[in-house]
Amino acid sequence: MSVLQCGRFKLQLDRPHVMGIVNVTPDSFSDGGRYDSVARAVAHAERLVADGADILDIGGESTRPGATPVSVDEETRRVVPVLAALQSLNVPLSVDTRRPAVMRAALETGIDLINDVAALEEDGALALVARSKAAVCLMHKQGDPQSMQREPTYEDVCAEVCTYLAARRDAALASGIAHERILLDPGFGFGKTLAHNTALFQGLAGLQVRLGCALLIGVSRKTMLGQLTGRPVGERLPASLAAALLAAQAGVRVIRVHDVRETVDALRIWAALK
Ligand SMILES: Nc1nc2ncc(COP(=O)(O)OP(=O)(O)O)nc2c(=O)[nH]1
């Protein structure tokens, strides 16, 4: 795949794109509470764009392990004003939600991508997105945030994640979502042990070939990086950059990060010297 038809935008996927995270939540695992007002979220988003973000991903519900679900009304209240305020930035806007009602409200503001950690499994989600022009990211998870890290178990994590993502890709295609609007994501940390995450990461290139769709990944500041380095969540920038470069090397075309400026610089070096 060389193009992502992303709402108002057509992204040429001939290079890795940086998706900047804007968590409008009080409890996100690494930046909860920092951007939990419209003004602070908008200011942060504007800075991420100035730092080189290709896409902005606005989320109103933490999906970290153990997170408490947020009501649809509260999640909508958090993200819609921010999305509306960001329309003028002229950069692809994504909403990170699994709720069709939140998707609908976000689409009405004119967003360009639905980032759904539940891969449009909720009733009505597929048809809703199919009627839009937005791109979609379909992510794999095993279980739900409240319990997914209790005992994640697979026979063959790469094969099972690939099979699931292929099925969700086919469901999206069957609902009328064109191939050029689909991103797939193995869901690092969503019902996976370190061994599962490692196997999935090492299998990224093969996953992309087997699925025939561009991949999006999110490992920024995540627990797997802490397990490998012993660093607390606030000290995982070097590990996050290393993982972003390895993902780029594997052909991943959208990398979801908190630290946009540093990731953009690292990818510039990678592009120039690889
Ligand atoms: N497609 C996709 N979306 C995601 N959304 C949230 C998180 C969790 O990270 P973050 O948003 O930083 O934390 P929280 O869920 O606590 O807000 N990870 C992913 C991911 O890996 N892939």
Image (cartoon, rainbow, N blue to C red):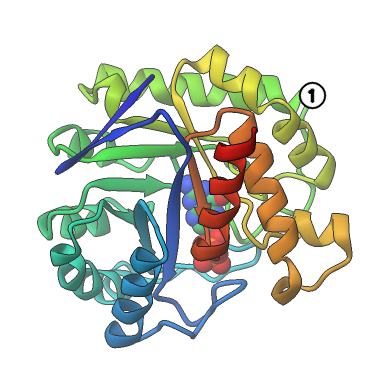
Mark 1: give few (<14), some (14-19) or many (20+) Cα within 10 Å: few
Vertical position of residue 260 compared to residue 232: above or below: above
Q: Position of residue 217 (x, y in %)?
A: 55, 42
The answer to which of 25 and 238 lies nearer the viewer is: 238
Which residue reaches farthest front?
273
**Mark 1 residue's CB less than 8 Å from ligand 1:** no
Q: Quadrant of residue 133?
A: top left
Identified at 55% across, 38% down, the residue is 271
Identified at 14% across, 39% down, the residue is 132
Image quarter in which the N terminus is found: top left
Q: Quadrant of residue 178?
A: top left
Image quarter in which the C terminus is found: top right
Vertical position of residue 95 compared to residue 129: above or below: below
The answer to which of 82 and 43 lies nearer the viewer is: 43
- Which SS class for mark 1? loop
Q: In this view of the protein, can residue 170 be seen by the observer? A: yes
- 44 sits to left or right of 76: right
Q: Position of residue 262 (x, y in %)?
A: 57, 62
Identified at 27% across, 17% down, the residue is 174
Q: Quadrant of residue 179?
A: top left
The answer to which of 132 and 42 lies nearer the viewer is: 42
Q: Position of residue 180 (x, y in %)?
A: 29, 24
- 220 sits to left or right of 55: right
Q: Which amino acid, by three-letter code, is at mark 1?
A: Glu
Q: Position of residue 16 (x, y in %)?
A: 48, 38
Identified at 87% across, 60% down, the residue is 229
Q: How many marks?
A: 1
Residue that mark 1 sits on: 155
The answer to which of 169 and 231 lies nearer the viewer is: 231
- 256 sits to left or right of 132: right
Vertical position of residue 175 compared to residue 12: above or below: above
Q: In this view of the protein, can residue 120 be seen by the observer? A: no
